[in-house]
Amino acid sequence: MKTNDMNQPVVHAIFIVLAALCVIPFLLLFMSSISSESSIVNNGYSFWPKEFSLEAYTYLWSQKLAMFNSYGVTILITVIGTFVGLLISALLAYPLSRQDLPIRGILSFIVFFTLLFNGGLVPTYLIYTEVFHMKNTLMALIVPGLLTNGFFILLIRTFFANSIPVQIIESAYIDGASEFKIFYRMVLPLSLPILATIGLMLTINYWNDWFNGLVYITEPQLFSIQNLLNRMLSNIQFLQQNNLGGQNMAVNLPMNGVRMAMAVVGILPLILIYPFFQKYFVKGLTIGAVK
Amino acid sequence: MTRTGWALTFKKLKRYRALFLMMVPGLAYLIMNNYLPMFGVIIAFKDINYAKGILGSDWIGFKNFEYLFTTKDALVITRNTILYNGSFIVLNTVFAIGVAILLNEVRSKFAARLYQSVILLPFLISMVIVGYLVLSMLSAESGYLNLNLLPMLGIEPISWYFEPKYWPYILTIVQLWKGTGYLCVIFLAAIIGIDNEYYEAATIDGASKWHQIRSITVPLIAPTITIMTLLAIGRIFYSDFGLFYQVPLNSGPLQPVTDVIDTYVYRGLMTLGDIGMSSAAGLYQSVVGFVLVLLSNYIVAKRSKENALF
């Protein structure tokens, strides 16, 4: 029985307004990217340009080498980072989920303490650059994001402990299966939901990461798509100055539009596939909050 | 230990060596990424000289902290950090609860899912993209506000990126726009978990919708609200670096109102090369942050053991 509902048209009206507020900035970005440069110069960015034009995209296409390069970097670090991050998280979480593991308490605390205290940017930066010499390497874009801290490990450990019956593990061990075999033949297949969820969160983190690039990368060849966007946000001429695309263009560049077109190119893949993963995204957010 | 005791330990080690081996990469990573920097906080007490190395640099005690706290900077960044994050906590919570309750009232499953996806969209994208979205609105020479909206209202164009007085509002709106969706999802999950019988009984007793929200929904999700708020208070010393760095485009004139501890540490390290000051501010953040996390968790644990971190 579900009586006494709120007035549905009113509720829908409120949500249409809220949804519009969320979408409108994206719409302005997109419309600006298909405006002609002269209409941006004369009338600014607008929701309905005086004159439509694809000149910004044409220019970006002429600089495609730089963009493909950045996309390549982003895809590479996202794939490697997600895979390796997931692997070492699961490998660390599984033994910690075993009640019979010696010194389990101490080891769990070592993982857990990283959530409470961190050294901060300066020591981290000096250790990555001065000790491990990762400045201007792809490693700098991958390594800092692998675990960040022990949070995901604790989530996976809880899942292992709650959803994998100890009896299965024990009987497999008695039957002579090695611990590694038990891990990848039984534990991993039984844990696909949590691994998929954490994997998705890692993927989004890597795809969106601009901070590591900002701190550790100065070579334009190693810029991820986010770093390229980041540089073009503060320096509109960046693509042109660094001549990343190979050829030099005429002086009259559609820079105001290019900037926006670049941002559209940067978010498009994520927005296009968002409907397909949004369910798992929501799940990932909620398990993170209520452990 | 007796002979058999040793034998037992040895047997145990052999029994578990595969499990220990599995943990090696993860633990090694945490040592490198998390524990080394924790010990690295000693730089705050040193006069860093690259030629001498981190360990070889001279100890100078609390000098870096003395400098930091005699400048106006420490006060400004602490004030900004706490005021911004404090108001974000209040506004986000109130707003997210409201939206979550409303979302739960949408009867069409399809519409509810669609609304939730759209409201969560800003949370999905990176702060760099948010920087672009804000720029398309506020850019001085081609922004939507200056060239289209303000002329329509008969207001003179404003140099947004040079006028500090607007930024507390701009940053708050941007933060609310980006962050509400996340909290809303959390609260909605809690609301969905409420047993329908409460509402049925209330309806039979003739309670109005508003009355039901006040007397059933809010009290029953109160534990979640408390936990989320306390966790946020525990992190009040840490800001969203992207919000305060990307969105104002790192503009100098705006710094008095956009500078928080995180941006101060970053600028000290990367642009000013003032490692002493920067590491002192960083350690100040880590230590106060640590105390706040412990404190808030202590309160959470007192209220409900299972929601505490430890």
Image (spheres, rainbow, N blue to C red):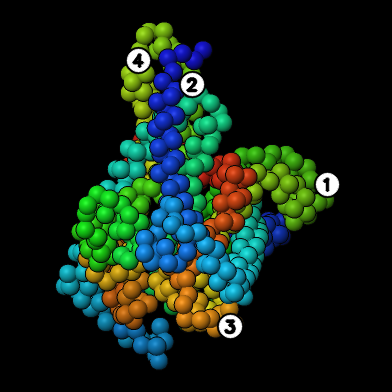
**Mark 1 surroundings: few (<14), some (14-19) or many (≥20) residues within 10 A:** few
Mark 1 vs 3, N-terminal side = 1
Q: Amino acid at mark 2?
A: Asp
Coordinates of residue B202 in the picture (x, y in percent): 40, 13
Mark 2 vs mark 3: tell me if same chain: no
Dot 2 and dot 4 within a common chain: yes
Camera-near label (2 vs 1) is: 2
Label 2: which residue? B195
* First reached walking from the N terminus: tag 2 or tag 4: 2
Q: Mark 2, mark 3: which one is toward the viewer?
A: 3
Give the answer, above or below, for where A16 lies relative to A84: above
Asked whether residue B232 is in view, the answer is no
Measured in 3D between alpha carbons, the distance from the residue under mark 2 to the one under mark 1, in whole angstroms, is 45 Å
**Chain letter behind tag 1:** A
Asked which secondary structure carries label 1, the reply is loop
Q: Give the residue furthest to the right.
A: A175
Determine contact: label 4, label 3, CB under 8 Å.
Answer: no
Local secondary structure at mark 4: loop
Residue placed under numbered mark 1 in the picture? A175
Which residue position holds label 4?
B208
Q: Which residue is at 37% across, 77% downward?
A: B270
Question: Between marks 2 and 3, how big is the CA–CA gap?
Answer: 65 Å
Of discs 4 and 3, which sits in the foreground?
3
* Circles 2 and 3 in contact, beta carbons < 8 Å: no
Would you say B197 lies left or right of A171 here?
A: left
The residue identified by callout 3 is A247
* Marks 1 and 3 belong to one chain: yes
Subunit that carries the residue with mark 2: B
Are labels 4 and 3 assigned to the same chain?
A: no
Tell me what residue is drawn at x 61 percent, y 39 percent: A162
